[in-house]
């Protein structure tokens, strides 16, 4: 049984795993919408599901969330892009998942300067996994926090909005 939220609840959250083993969390707002700012420095910018079975993951998330699938114009043979109402919301991973690495979701956070943010990661006990590199809409890097959780840092040439 799932308990009903109390009168001061911000929302309802469920933590689950998809058929490939990738753990994810859903949020149903009550008093707090969730991520009020996205696609800006200091905020969430993107999420990728890295899995050994993109087809199973795509079928699951499309059924669960009502997403549709497509591809990136610049990489038609690349990852599956999930859309909702015609807007991209997430994707499968650009790179194949190495054998033995479990399926997982990886998030990207916006920063105003990827290189400076990587220096801050190192200064605060984290690690730079993939040094800054240029890509179509900007610059990115893969880092981990002191506990080993990996995430991406992204600076876009033109931030939406």
Image (cartoon, rainbow, N blue to C red):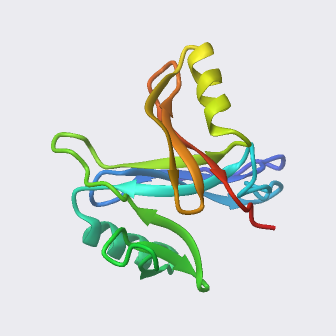
Look at 71% across and 51% down and name the residue there: 5
Rendered residue at 78%/59% (across/down): 33
x%, y% of residue 118? 59, 28
In the rendered view, would you say 95 is above or below 70? above
* Res. 123 image quadrant: top right
98 relative to 78 in the view: left or right:
left
Whether residue 70 appears in this view of the structure is yes
Q: Is residue 129 left or right of residue 35?
A: left
Q: Looking at the image, which residue sits at the far left?
A: 99
Quadrant containing the C terminus in the rendered view: bottom right
Percent x, y of residue 16 = 43, 52
Q: Is residue 4 visible?
A: no
Please tell me which residue is depicted at 16% across the width and 44% down the height of the picture: 99
Give the number of callouts: 0
Q: Which residue is the extreme one toward the front?
A: 134
Residue at left 60%, top 52%?
Answer: 13
Image quadrant in which you'd find residue 89? bottom right
Q: Is residue 141 left or right of residue 129?
A: right
- Between residues 63 and 85, which one lies in front from this camera angle? 85
Q: Quadrant of residue 93?
A: bottom left
Give residue 98's position: percent from left, percent from top.
21, 45
Q: Position of residue 108 (x, y in %)?
A: 57, 48
From this view, report whether residue 70 is shown above or below residue 36.
below
């Amino acid at each position: 049984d799932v308990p009903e939220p109390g009168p001061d609840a911000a929302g309802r959250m469920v933590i689950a795993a998809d058929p490939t083993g990738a753990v994810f969390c859903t949020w149903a707002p009550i008093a707090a919408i969730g991520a009020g700012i996205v696609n800006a420095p200091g905020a969430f910018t993107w999420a990728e599901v890295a899995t050994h079975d993109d087809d199973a993951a795509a079928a699951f998330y499309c059924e669960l969330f009502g997403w549709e699938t497509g591809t990136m114009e610049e990489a038609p043979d690349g990852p599956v892009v999930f859309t909702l109402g015609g807007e991209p919301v997430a994707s499968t991973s650009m790179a194949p998942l190495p054998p033995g690495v479990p399926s997982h979701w990886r998030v990207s956070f916006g920063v105003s300067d990827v290189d400076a943010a990587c220096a801050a990661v190192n200064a605060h006990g984290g690690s730079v996994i993939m040094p800054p590199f240029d890509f179509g809409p900007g610059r990115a890097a893969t880092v981990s926090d002191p506990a080993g959780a990996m995430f991406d840092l992204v600076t876009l040439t033109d931030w939406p909005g």
